Amino acid sequence: MIKKKALWKDIFRSFKHSKGRFISILLLMMISSFALVGLKVTGPDMRETGKTYFSELNMADITVIGSYGLDDSDQKAIGKTAGVRQIDYGYFKDVTKKNSTESFRIFSKTKDVSTYQIEKGHLPQKDNEIALDAKYVEEYKLGDTIRFSEKADSTNSKRLKKDRFKIVGFVDSPEVISSLNRGQSTAGTGELDGFGIVNSANFDSPYYMIARMTFNDTRNLNPYTDDYKEKVQKHKDDLDEQLKEQPAARLTAIKAEYQTKVSDEKKQLTDARAQLSDGQSQLEAVREQLTAARQELEMQKQKAAQTDYVPEQLKAQLLASEQELVQKEADYQNQRKQFDVKKEEVQKKLMTGESQIADAQKTLDQLKQPVYLVNSRREAPGSEGYKIYNSISTIVDALANVFPVFLFLVAALVTFTTMGRFVDEERKNSGALKALGYTDKDIYKKFVVYGLSSSMAGTIIGIILGHTLLPLIVYNTYHEGFTIPKIQLEFHWEISVIACVLAFISAVIPALLSAKKELRERPADLLLPKAPAQGSRILLERIPFIWNRLSFTHKVTARNLFRYKKRMLMTIFGVAGSVALLFAGFSVQHSIEGINERQFGELIRYDMIVAESDILTPAQKNAIQQQLTDPTVKEYASVHYETVTKTAGAAGDTQEIKLIVPEKTQNFSDYIQLNDRKTKKELQLKDDGVIITERLAKLLKAEVGDEIKVKDAENQKRTVKVEGITEMYMGHFMFMNQNEYQSVFKQDFHSNASLVNLKDASEKNTKEQAAKFIDLAGVVGVVQNTTMTSQITMIVNSLNKIMEVLVLVAVLLAVVILYNLTNINVSERIRELSTIKVLGFFDKEVTLYIYRETMLLTAIGILFGFGLGEWLHQFILTAVPPNDVMFNPALSSISFIVPTIIIVVVTIILGFIINHRLKTIDMLEALKSVD
């Protein structure tokens, strides 16, 4: 048996003599594996972190909120739902911190469902204690007292028994995980700032306000899987069925209850009138008695006066009678005055009572059926953070399905070429080994060991960095906006194995295939250099008008390009791949930057929406009108505003669509600009259709002329025709005019909100003015743009940081690819270059002889890269954004300029490196014959 010592010496010598190639393959596989593994594991790591957190705190799968509370009949209906594991009923109320506009949602302490992560202190045990949102741990100390102000509800009642609490703890809640966007509030500025936990005994309410539910079949399930979502949707459907009859039954019960109260109030007013009438009658009777007594006394006086002698006794009796009557008349006058005062008070009370009863009766008559909100975790109040967190993880997933796959393909093809060149360079050594009696299998070992060592070393480094560095980079972009714990770094063996397999395919398989082809030849043939590629006439030579005007060197360049077709195509594709990744990276960054400015500066121009109560008293209307005409308000427009819904998107989520119907279409563009993004044409509201936002249209796959169905606030389906699609980047909107509204909803138009523009639109002043509106009894809510702004900022910052990493990866890839391909080109043609140098070409001419081809192919690759990059950019814009966000698909000059500069700079630097190498090469050694 032949000893393998020489073989292994040759293998180790190949490592020593080709360090550049080894490092290039290592870097290519490291970069590719890092991007692939990093992007593929970050999303799952985020979701696993969320799953662990929500599971530990036993977060509710579904919450049920009734607009009129949840009475015994509601609880019975909810309890009939199949598969329920736990139900936790509770209370909540939005309030403001005393003497401020800061809003808090005060929850009753839960028992087993949606419990709390205690950051400091403990949960409230006494009724005067509160555990505050951990967001305020630096602002307050344990033992501090906090006071709240509560706005009375429509019945002029307050739900909290106390307004002063002692802070005993700071907690996080799984239901409110965003520290930037916590949703809307009916207190403060209209946006929720924080929350607090108190004992349920602090609430003065006859009914529970919320039901938190968990189910047996969702226990320990990953909440981000389709299986979980399908099970939750099934339970939601079951709950909807159980609660189907409740709105009508509840409305009947409420009307009966309050009608009894109204009737009792009416009876009390009737009794008060009767008492007043009785008092009047009694006073009248006394007056008549006193009048009769006065007449009788006067008659006695006249009779005595007609008598010559009046006994002293009679005189005394008449005087006593006079005094007694005067006293009675004085008493009567006092009683009369007291009665008149009391009468006036009673009449005022009667008038007020009658007015209140009339208002109460009107309110009672106008009461609508209660609405039961059956919400999943993604839909519950305060769930904005849950949705944004999931959106960020799915953004990373979407990028993982596009960017690293493309990157790995480019790197694999370059590695394929590199290893093929390695086999060619080892042709002489392979022939020698074969001549010494080594089998083909033995010779294969060299290429397997070399390819496996370089590719696996790079892949392992990439896997390690992918599992640690990229998830932590992404975590650092979002962690300040969420109360979720630090990202859990899990090992994902599946993608790690895939990365290793891809590296093996990229580096080892091509080497084996090339070696197999080479080793078919005899050892004697292998010891000879491979015959150069045969030249042939090219197409350009058949066009004399062009060919005859080319210089000699340019003709050589043209012939060589087609002579080495494989290298030409690999250079073009390698450069194009690098440019495409850079182009897509910079284009995505441009697509996401400036969205806030475009959306909330040019498209949505109002500062806030002031939503009014469905039932307003004249006094409440006047108060709102006064605030709208306040000097701080620049202008306002009356609109009908409500939220309609539509199930859409890959997750089957309920999409909330803001429906806005202006009272007057004139000057509507002062508040909202409606225009087609592609044509820049302004859109007008017409009688035969609606205008919807572009992202919603894409989700519904709707075009102009299509009909779509939505559900209104009362869960009734409404069909509308799409008349136009307007540019909008955040949130879903639908716009229609009065006539279309009346046609679709089969009811008269009435405004219930105002779009408001302020003279001072700064964030501080907007919050101050919003708080003034919220304080009004007739206002149910204020919608500001700052909520959506903070949400999109979080998404944009996270995606931007990821794209910065991917752009850096693409730059490194471009450097390695250009170095590799240029190095291969020089190595393959070293004898040719030595020949022309010996013939008298100067160093610069020798470099340009070969580098002119590289520059030309690089230019062609850049142009192809732009087209490929735009396709990749558009694909990312389709796959990445959350359901309610659209990225701007417009291109920027930066996307063309920066990738070009990067590639040109790298090409120039490599040109100097190649020039130095060609200067120092031993030409005679290169031209030595191998015979």
Image: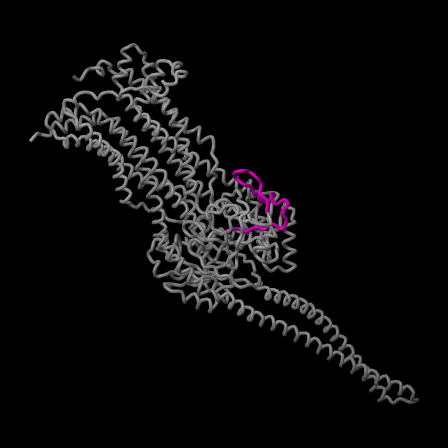
Q: Position of residue 306 (x, y in %)?
A: 92, 87
Between 634 and 452, the one lying in front of the other is 452
Q: Is residue 794 above or below residue 560?
A: below
Residue at x 71% of width, y 76% of height: 277
> Where does the C terminus fall, quadrant-wise?
top left
Between 598 and 699, the one lying in front of the other is 699
Q: Position of residue 807 (x, y in %)?
A: 38, 34
Q: Position of residue 585 (x, y in %)?
A: 41, 35
Q: Is residue 583 above or below residue 654?
A: above
Between 402 and 371, the one lying in front of the other is 402
Residue at x 64% of width, y 56% of height: 621
Between 539 and 296, the one lying in front of the other is 539
Residue 678 is one of the magenta-drawn residues: yes
Q: Main secondary structure of the magenta part?
A: loop
Q: Is residue 724 above or below residue 516?
A: below
Indicate left or right for 371 with 759 as reference.
left
Residue 412 is one of the magenta-drawn residues: no
The magenta region covers: 657-685
Q: Would you say residue 797 is visible in this rendering?
A: yes
Residue at x 61% of width, y 55% of height: 749
> Where does the N terminus fall, quadrant-wise?
top left
Q: Position of residue 560 (x, y in %)?
A: 32, 20
Q: Residue furthest left?
A: 1
Q: Quadrant of residue 480?
A: top left
Q: Residue furthest top?
A: 840
Indicate left or right for 741 with 375 as reference.
right
